[in-house]
Amino acid sequence: MKYVDEFRDRALARQLAGAIAAEAVPEREYRLMEFCGGHTHAIFRYGVQDLMPPNLRFVHGPGCPVCVLPIARIDQAIALTEQHGVTLCTYADMMRVPGSDRRSLLVAKAAGADVRMVYSTQDALAVARADPTRQVVFFAIGFETTTPPTAVVMKQARAEGLANFSVFCNHVLTPPALRAILAAQGPEGVSIDGILGPSHVSTVIGSAPYGFVPEEFGKPLVIAGFEPLDVMQSALMLIRQINTGRCEVENQYRRAVTPEGNRKAQALMADCFELRESFEWRGLGFLPASALKIRKEYSDLDAEIRFPVETRESREVKGCECPAILRGVKRPTDCKLFGTICTPENPMGSCMVSSEGACAAYWSYGRFRDAARTEGQAA
Amino acid sequence: MGGGSISGSGRRFSLRLDLERGAVDMSHGSGGRAMAQLIEELFKRHLDNELLRQGNDQALFAPPPGRLVMSTDGHVISPLFFPGGDIGSLAVHGTINDVAMAGARPLYLAAGLILEEGLPLSDLDRIVRSMARAASEAEVPVVTGDTKVVERGKGDGVFITTTGVGLVPEGIRISGDLARPGDAILVSGTMGDHGIAVLSKRENLGFETEIRSDTAALHGLVAAMVEAVPDIHCLRDPTRGGLATTLNELANQSAIGMQIREANIPVRPEVAAACELLGLDPLYVANEGKLVAICPSDKAQTLLDAMRGHPLGRESAIIGQVVEDPHQFVQMETGFGGQRIVDWLAGEQLPRIC
C-alpha cells in the first residue's frame, strides 16, 4: 500500500530502535504518555514495545472516545430508544459498551430497540431520509476529529428540511482532558516525563493549543502520527527533549498538522456547537468547558432537547478500574477484573470494548508478555 | 407456512412461471400446485440428476465402503449477489469444503431453502442456476432438498442450508486435534478476498473495488494435497472470523500454540487497502475458497509444491509453525518487527457475510 507501507517499514524501525537505544540514558526512566487510543492500538498491533529499551514505558492516555464516555450517557442513549422509540444510529464500538447494570445498546437492541450500526454520519442521515416516519437520532461521540462531520450532517439536515433527524451530542475536547491529567497530583495523578500528542485531533485544532503543556506543566509534547514509525520517531524526539532539558511542543506529524489547524473544520464546529459549562468524563470526572453542545440556533436538531429522558443514577461496575486506567495511574493488569471476568467478549468496562482501549489492546495483542513474565519468575 | 420436497413428483402446468416479473408468494410454500410448479420448473430443471429424478422425499443410494463424513452449513449472506459469486454458489462450495476438510471426497449434497415472500423469481432462478453450475463443476450433485416460504419481513430474501456427505480415503486421518509442536502451518492463498468483496457491495459502504470473492470448491485441491502428503494433520477453511479465528480454533483443539510471521501471509494489496480504510484486520476477514493446512515440518515443502501445482493453490505459503504453549496463544511476528498475539475475534467484525 502506497503511502502506508512506508510508515511501517521494518528496516527503518530497526534504525530508529537503534537510535532510541543509543540515546536513552540507561540510568533514567522514560514514561511517555501516548494520549490517543490510536497510538495505543499501533503500539500493541505492531509490537512497538518490543523495539524499545526496557527503561522506556508507554503510559496509556485517555484519548479513546468510546472509553471516556461516562456510563450516564450510555444509559441516556438506551433511554432514548426505550422512552421515545427513536431509531438510534451509532458507531459499532458503542454498541458493546456496558451501561448501568451492564446493559448495553446491543442488549437493548436484542430486546427490541431500533439500534443501527453506521460507518459514518452520512449513513445516519441516509437512514433518516429513507424512512420519514421514524425519528432518527445520531449518537455523536468523539473528540475534535469526529465533530466536523457531525456539523456537516446537521447542516445538510437543515438544508434538506429533514424533520426526523437529530443528534445526541457527546463531542468532547482534547486540551481540557490533557490539562486534567497533568493537573492531577498525589495518588490520583500519574507521573509522566513527556507526551505523545494527538494525531488526528491536531489536524483539526493545530499544534498551537498545546502551548500550556510545557508552559504551565513543564512537560514536553510531541504531536505524533498514528503509524508505528511515527510513534517511534516521536518517542525519540521526546527522549532528546528530556535528555537536553528542553521542554516544548514539537510536531512530528508535519505531513498533516499545521500550527493553526483546519480553519474550515473549526468554523463548521463553531457554527453548530458551543461549549458546555461542564461535562462528565469517565475517569476524569466533571471537567469545566470540556465538551460541546448544540447551539440554540440548531435546537431542532438537538436530541437532548427534543427527546428528554429520565434515567436513574448511573453505576460503574464494582471493581472496574477503567477510571484509573484512563488517567494512566493504573495499568490494565492492575485491575482484578482484567482477563478474569472482563474480556473483549464480555466487557465490564469501556476500556475493554474498543480496540483503542488500553485493556482491549493489552488483552488482544499483548497478554503473552505477562504469561512469559510469570513463567520467568516461576522458573 | 408449507413446505415442499425439491424431489417431489412432477406435473405439467398450463402457464409457465413468470421468471421475469414474478415473485415468490405464500402459495409457493403451501404444498399445492404453485409449489409443485416452482419445484418442477426451477429446482428440478436446473439441479437435475439421477437421484433427484427418483422423485421421493429422500434420495436412495448405496453407501460406498469406508468411512463417511457428514457436514451441514447455513448460508445467510447479504447481499445475495456479490462479485465472484452469490448465495447459491456459496451454499454449494461451503458444504463441499467442510466435507473436504476431512480429506474426504464429497459425494452428495442436500439443500434446504427458506424463501421470503416477495423474492423476485428472477433472483431465485439465478440463485438455483448458480447452485446447479457450482454442483456440476464440482461433480457433487444436489440429490434431495426442501423449500419453505416465510412471510415478508421474516426472512432476508433467501436462506440456504446445505448438507453433504463424503468418503474419506483409506489411511487418511485429518482432524483439528492433531497439530503437534514443530508442525508447519500453510495457507492456500490470499486472505480476506471474500469478506471484502461482499462488503464492497453493501449499500452503506459503496467503495469501488475490483476484488472478487474467492468462493470455490476445494476438494480437488485437497485431493492433490492428500495424495502428495497423506499424513497431513489438520485442514480447515478459514471462513467466518478469518485466518485468526481458524488458527485459534486449531490451537485450542490441539492444545498447542502457534508462531506465525505476518510478512509470509499473502494478502492482496487491494484487500489490505480496503481493510485499512474500514479499520479491519485482513486476518479476521472471511474466505470461502482458502484452507489452512498443518503437516509435519519435513513434509511442508512437498505439500507446498503440491498446493502451488493446483489452480486454487498457486499463492500458497508456509506462514509459521506449531509450538508448545500451555496458553495456546497464536503469536505473530509483525511485519514491523515486533511481536503480538493474534486473538480470537471479539464480537462481530462484519455481520452476515457467509
Image: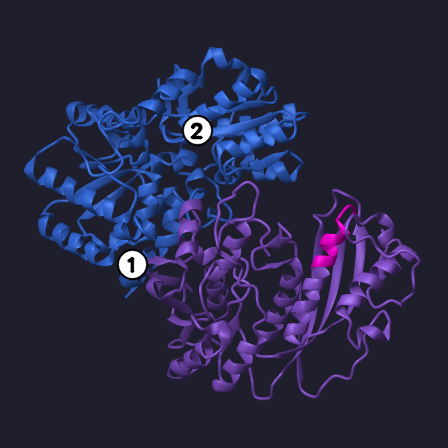
| Label 1 residue SS | helix
The residues bearing labels 2 and 1 have C-alpha atoms spaced at a distance of 44 Å
Q: Does residue B344 appear in the picture of this structure?
A: no
Please tell me which residue is depicted at 9% across the width and 47% down the height of the picture: A25
In the image: residue B69, left or right of residue A295: right
- Dot label at residue B75: none
Can you identify the residue that label 1 sits on?
A: A373
Q: Amino acid at mark 1?
A: Arg
Vertical arrangement, residue B48 with respect to residue B32, above or below? below
Q: Which tag is nearer the camera, tag 2 or tag 1?
A: 2
Q: In the rendered structure, which disc, 2 or 1, sits on the residue that comes first in sequence?
A: 2
Chain letter, colour blue: A
> How many badges with numbers are in the image?
2
Q: Which chain is home to disc 1?
A: A
In the image: residue B180, left or right of residue B167: left
Q: Does residue B83 appear in the picture of this structure?
A: yes
Q: Which chain is home to disc 2?
A: A
Q: Which residues are magenta?
A: B117-126
In the image: residue B192, left or right of residue A53: right
- Crowding at dot 1, Cα within 10 Å, few <14 / some 14-19 / many 20+, comes out as few
Can you identify the residue that label 2 sits on?
A: A149
Is B121 contained in the magenta span? yes
Find the residue positioned furthest to the left: A244
In the image: residue B250, left or right of residue A362: right
Please tell me which residue is depicted at 79% across the width and 64% down the height of the picture: B43
Vertical arrangement, residue B264 with respect to residue B184, above or below? above
The hue of chain B in the figure is: purple
| Label 2 residue SS | helix
Q: Amino acid at mark 2?
A: Pro
Vertical arrangement, residue B283 with respect to residue A361, above or below? below
Q: Main secondary structure of the magenta part?
A: helix
Which picture quadrant has residue B81?
bottom right
